[in-house]
Amino acid sequence: MELLTGVFSAFGLSASAGLNAYIPLLVVSLLAKFTDLIKLHSPWDTLTSWWVIALLVVLGGIEFFVDKIPAVNHINDILQTFVRPVAGAIVFAASAKVVTDLSPILSMIAGLLVAGSVHTVKSVAVRPALTAATAGVANTPVSIAEDVISTFLSILAILIPIIIGIILVLFTSTFIWWKWRKANAAKPI
C-alpha cells in the first residue's frame, strides 16, 4: 500500500507543479520541515533548508502576481515551460521514495512528463483560448483558481493520496471513453 500511496502522492504533486511550480515544492518543504506527514531523504531533504523555503516563497510570490497580469502572464508561461516540468520532476522524485529507490531517473522522467503535460495544456490550449474569448478579463480569476487548485491538490496528494488515484482513474477512463466515442462516431454504420 505504501508503494501506491507514494506513487499517487508523487503524481498529484507533479500535476500540481504543472499549474504552479512553487506551490507543491513549498507545501512539501513546509510539511517536511514542520510535520511528520512527509519524510524527505537525501538529497531531497535540502528542500527543508530555510534558504530554499525563503527562495520558494519569493519565487512563488513573484509568479503569483506576474500570472495575474494579462499579456505578461503569457511571457511567464513561456519562462515556466522550463521551470514547471523541472519542479514536477523534483517533487515527484522527492515524494516517491519507493519509485526513486528503484530508479531515480524513472521518477524524474515521470514527474517531468506529468508536470510538463499539465503545463502544456494550461499554457497552449486553455489560457490562450480564455484570453481570446474574454479579451484577458478571465486571466486573473483563472490564475487564482489555478493557484487554489495547485495548493489543494498538493495538500490532498500528501494527506489523502488515494483520492489522487481515484482522480487518475476517473480522468484516464473518461479520456479513453471520449477517444473511443470520437473514433466510433467517425465510422459509417
Image (tube, rainbow, N blue to C red):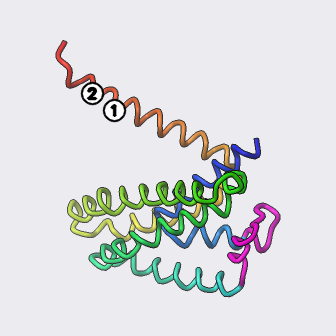
Q: Position of residue 26 (x, y in %)?
A: 63, 73
The crowding category of the residue bearing disc 2, from other C-alpha atoms within 10 Å (few below 14, some 14 to 19, many at least 20), is few
* Element carrying mark 2: helix
Residue at 61% in and 70% down: 25
Residue at 71% in and 55% down: 101
Classify residue 96 by image quadrant. Answer: bottom right
Q: Position of residue 95 (x, y in %)?
A: 68, 60
Q: Quadrant of the N terminus?
A: top right
From the image, tell me which residue sits under label 2. 183
What's the amino acid at mark 2? Ala
* Residue 143 left/right relative to 86: left
Q: Position of residue 157 (x, y in %)?
A: 64, 54
* Residue 54 left/right relative to 149: right
Q: Quadrant of the C terminus?
A: top left
Decide: is 174 above or below 124: above
The number of numbered discs placed on residues in the rendered structure image is 2
What stretch of residues is rendered in magenta? 31-49
Residue at 37% in and 71% down: 140
Asked whether 142 falls inside the magenta stretch, the response is: no
* Residue 174 left/right relative to 108: left
Q: Residue furthest top?
A: 189
Residue at 29% in and 75% down: 70
Pick the residue in front: 128 or 182.
182
Pick the residue in front: 55 or 70.
55
Asked whether 37 falls inside the magenta stretch, the response is: yes
